[in-house]
Image (cartoon, helix red, strand yellow):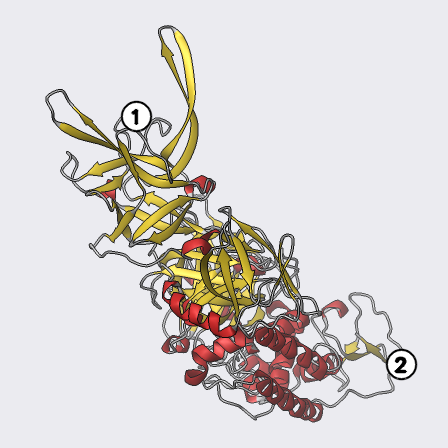
Amino acid sequence: MFIVKRLFFILLLAATAANVVAQAFDPATRYRIELTAFAGDIADRAAVYSTDPEVNSAYYRVEGQENPIGQESLWYIRRAGDGWTVQNAATLRYLAYQEYTVTYNWNGETHSYDSRGIKPRTVANGDSAVWLIDFENGSYTFCNKANPEVFLGVYAYTYTWEEGDTYTYSRIDAYVRGTEAYNAVYSNLMTIYAEDGTVLSGQGTPGGTLASLRIGGKMPVAYAEGSGYMVTVPEMPTSGTLEADVTWLQTGLRLEIEGAETTETGFRIAGADFRQPYPFRIVGTEDEEVTTSRFYFTTMPIAEITCKGANGSTYVVGSFRLQDNATTRPDTTYTAQFKYRGATAQRYAKKSFNVKLLEADGVTDLDANLLGLRNTHTWILDAMYVDGIRMRNRVCFDTWNEMDRLPYATNYGSRNGTVGRFVEVFVNGEYRGLYCFTDKINRKLLNLTKVQFNVDSTEVTPRGLLYKGKQWGDETYLKAVPSGSMSASVTWGGWELEYPDDYPSVAAWTPLRNLINYGKMSQARFEAQFAENYYLPNLVNYVTLQLAYNLEDNGMKNMFISTKNIQKAGKQMIFTVWDMDSSLGGLWDGTHNDQVADTTYVTRVYPLARLFSRNWMSFRDSVRQRWEQLRESTLSYESLSERLTRYADLFVGSGAWGREYAKWGAAAELNENLYDEVDYVLAWYRRNRDYLDELLPPLPTGIGSSTFVPAGTEGIYTLDGRRVTGRTWQQLPPGVYIVNGRKTVR
């Protein structure tokens, strides 16, 4: 532990702040790597001598040689964990450090010796193909991650012929600092140019000795806005003590943090407060000061996006890394595609992203389980810009997942909604704030049956279907069939075909048209065919949540309808909610909404209007019963308070809310005191709960004990005397019924 005056650290930070610069190599840009000391480039001459990569070596192309500058001198520099890969644009091979044995025959005897060098590889497997890029004295250096004493360098050997002419032989080599050779010069200082000739300047990510530091297995991320570095750590115990291990890729370095106690393996901070930065310094073997800056600790994962030209219409290729604070394992950097998401949301400065993980080829989808959420290649980074508490959508989904389950098995526990974790995000080295990282509603999550290919494989039969409501209107309210004929398009009226979007067809849209037409049938036919079209408990749960949290931007817009397999029995359509920012006393534009449960958002959906307003099939009674069941558990005031407070404590305690407020507070009109906004939501919910108790009064009391009723029992009636037809006892929603003259609880 060391103690120094705050003023001393402020002066040091001011002196070194300019060095905290994140280098954003664009993964789609090709770069030329030139040796600073000579006019020549690093190139890859594939198949010049042999197609065997063990024989081929990287090549140093000197200006004026027989080969003009071409693609063999251009390289992609892309993120790979805490370093970078260097891939040739022509051969697609990666520069890698390699130790190997050379065997040869001399005068009939076999000899061998150990050697090492830089060899191109077809795949970037292992740390030997990863380089830690730094910036020294105006030039870049490439240090190998597998062996940090080795640098990417050029061996220049000068020799003279008898005629007196002097020549220089140059080749790429594994350069070790401080080494010398007879008549040879090693150099590891490089100048990097973009393909358009732009010279790059700045540091690596991060620069200097920070590239060698790991705290809890994680590499600090340059945080320019705070003139320091951000580090993700696990959530602390209730004691408030942060303990973390410190490791180095280089030797002879030591970390000292102001206010921290040095331990055998790292450091300990008692009563850690992450709302404030922690100044630190790194010292060498002679206690000399190497660098100084400050840490911003966070108990959230850190997501890093590197891409160029992101937009809302087409995906662009880049790289994506997500540091998981729940594990000390190194985090993978993925090749990925990015696109802004949302319609209205794209008008705001803080963008949301669709993220698609890809194989190294930049084309093939790559499934990965990130943050323990699920195995998939499609993800969302939700900016939550208009939400004053940055958690409404997540809280709504957490509640929905607890309330509703699909009526069939899936690989995700029959989950009918997204899961997510809050993260802090950097885009091209710039801090962008607090986001929610979530999975998506798609075929895999809902376990929808894939299309069936016909014998000739030119046509497909749709089976599992997933539709999404895109805009308000009678078409989306399931009241009117979209005008115009159905076609092989992914859109029809106000709807979008989410699956099978690769095979849009009239056959894929026909079930939606049939569903709309079914909703307009007479009461008798509607009730008789209900079980063929909808799963009643799902509709009851949706309406209950809609009223409890007053979802005002849903009602079939921002919602999904799906069926597991339209070709089989049990093909009921299932509702899945989506984008619930306009909820819990908040509107879509971020303003407060004091309106309590507005039933018009239920009754505008035509089949729900008939069920709820007219109490067909005792639907309103079922909603009343469901509210009565959940108001003391999942939908209780206490449950909502616990969810809101838990996330608010995470935001504030991690320091993320302070950083979010500093970044976006003025533009988004955030409340600096997050708990004031939480109190507003809870006060609104208390009023809404009391209103629902009046709108949905309790069912009659005095009912005796429950009676078991076997499947197929006839003579089931609702409490208002209407006979239930077309469903077995097990298919009925929870409620009270009259069976064989007796009140019975389902």
Q: Among all residues in the image, which is located at the extreme left?
A: 163
Which quarter of the image is occupied by the C terminus?
bottom right
Q: How much space separates mark 1 and mark 2, taking CA atoms?
A: 88 Å
- The answer to whether residue 510 is visible is no
Residue 279 location (% of width, % of height):
51, 67
- Closer to the chain start, of discs 1 and 2, is 1
Residue 135 location (% of width, % of height):
34, 54
Amino acid type assigned to the residue bearing label 1 in the image = Ser
Residue 65 location (% of width, % of height):
15, 35
- Count neighbours of disc 1 (C-alpha within 10 A) and say few if under 14, some if 14 to 19, many if 20 or more: few
Q: Quadrant of residue 627?
A: bottom right
Question: Which residue is identified by label 1?
Answer: 50
What residue appears at the point 73 percent right and 76 percent down from the top-left corner?
A: 724
- Count neighbours of disc 2 (C-alpha within 10 A) and say few if under 14, some if 14 to 19, many if 20 or more: few
Q: Are marks 1 and 2 in contact (CB under 8 Å)?
A: no
Residue 554 location (% of width, % of height):
52, 79
Q: Nearer the viewer, mark 1 or mark 2?
A: 1
Residue 704 bears which disc, if any?
2
